[in-house]
Amino acid sequence: MRTLIVEADGASRGNPGPASYGAVVRDAESGELLAELAETLGTATNNVAEYRGLLAGLEAVAAIDPGARVEVRMDSKLVVEQMSGRWQVKHPDMKPLAARAREILPREAVTYEWIPRSQNKHADRLANEALDAAAKGEAWKSKTPLTPAVGAVTPVASPAKAGAKVAWSADLGRPTRLLLLRHGVTPLTLEKRFAGIGDPPLTPLGEEQARRAAERLRADARFGPIDVILASPLQRTLATAGAVAKAVGIEVLPEPGFRELDFGRLEGLSFAEANEQYPAELAAFLGSPDVPPPGGETLTALAARAGRARDETIAKYPRQTVLVVTHVTPIKALVCQALGAPLSAVNRMELGAASLSVIDYYEDGLANVRCVNDVAHLG
């Protein structure tokens, strides 16, 4: 198994103050520099900036080779001890960051090592370069574009090889069926604002949409019977899943891999506001799945994460019908993977609140998309 080294650091001039992160990915055997990443974060503490650097490094590994063994080296004793499980994560600003860091790659593949600051100069330099560039009104630019290395595993590849085959499937019996239900509307949905790891509740309309979806899933034989209910661990998805669970009598199991994309500093903004505040960053994010929104997560990383959750679900619940209550971007990414379509196609799909999409996965690796954006239950 290939080993990659992640070096990460954060900087904050004021603590809290203008903050940034720097991260480096290297091949452990050859020492080859595979990626350099840095970005300003607005106002944040040094600890938050350090976690952001860790996230950037892990997401870069997910894009380069998600099957690699990873050695994370940081001069932050706090981050290393918390991510190693020896210290608790107590600060509310760091809890979601630590949780997300554990989702990006399999936990057993990542180890953490504290190193002296003198051995973490590269990542520290990148973080300060980003702050210096921002002070001049400029954007930091990497000299090492993030691209999959030779022999790397493509991030959207999966053990199930969903969408890899193009043929009529042999009669392999009952497939594993994923019923992909988007959550009902929230205040941000109605206002068409970016909502990722933020946690808005359902509106009364969203609660009614969840009840209607639940009734359809209970009564329509084409979708059931449901064997398992999984849900992204955010309140809007858990509430939607809870309505179905009440209707069919099955408990809800949280699955972090199906969480929505982290939109970073775009969270809560309308498209117009995002375009006004971050025009270049927004255009770059929409133009490439490998470019994150400012301070957020790449579409490539999300697709890899959702793909791993899908593969684990298929392996754990073979030939069963699994309801996955999730968000717009994971559903679109899974549909793209099943169809063998590029991730850029997510921007060409309509997926309404409380809509149903259905994908069957057969044991020969073939995926069959049965429907997308079915909202018949909403009238």
Image (cartoon, helix red, strand yellow):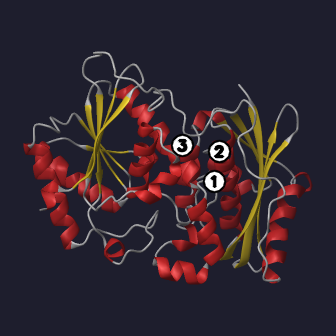
Report the residue marked by disc 1.
290
Q: Confirm or deny contact between disc 1 and disc 2 (CB under 8 A).
A: yes
Q: Are marks 3 and 2 in contact (CB under 8 Å)?
A: yes
**Picture coordinates of residue 308, whole percent (x, y):** 49, 37
Question: Residue 300: x and y, percent?
Answer: 57, 49
Q: Nearer the viewer, residue 86 or 70?
A: 70
Task: Looking at this view, name the residue that lies furthest to the right.
Answer: 118
Task: Give the left or right position of residue 14, taking residue 106 as reference.
Answer: right
Tell me the distance, in whole angstroms, between the alpha carbons under discs 3 and 1.
Answer: 12 Å
Eyeballing the image, is 138 above or below 226? Answer: below
- The residue tagged 2 is 63
Amino acid type for the residue under numbered disc 1? Asp
Mark 1 or mark 3, which is nearer the start of the sequence? 1
Q: Do the residues under discs 3 and 1 have CB atoms within 8 angstroms?
A: no
Q: Earlier in the sequence, mark 1 or mark 2?
A: 2
* Marks 3/2: CA–CA distance: 8 Å
Q: Quick one: quadrant of the C terminus?
A: bottom left
Hey, what amino acid is under mark 3? Ala
In the structure shown, which secondary structural element does the residue marked by tag 2 occupy? helix
* Local secondary structure at mark 1: loop
Q: Nearer the viewer, mark 3 or mark 1?
A: 1
Which residue is outermost to the front?
Answer: 167
Say which amino acid is labelled 2.
Ala
Which quadrant holds the N terminus? top right
Q: Which mark is residue 304?
A: 3
Q: Position of residue 88 (x, y in %)?
A: 57, 53
Give me the residue at 65% from left, 74% from top.
Answer: 280
For this view, does 71 lie left or right of residue 189?
A: right
Residue 317 x, y percent position in the rendering: 32, 28
Q: Is residue 48 visible?
A: yes
Mark 2 crowd level (few <14, some 14–19, many ≥20, 10 Å Cα): many
**Residue 294 in view (yes/no):** no
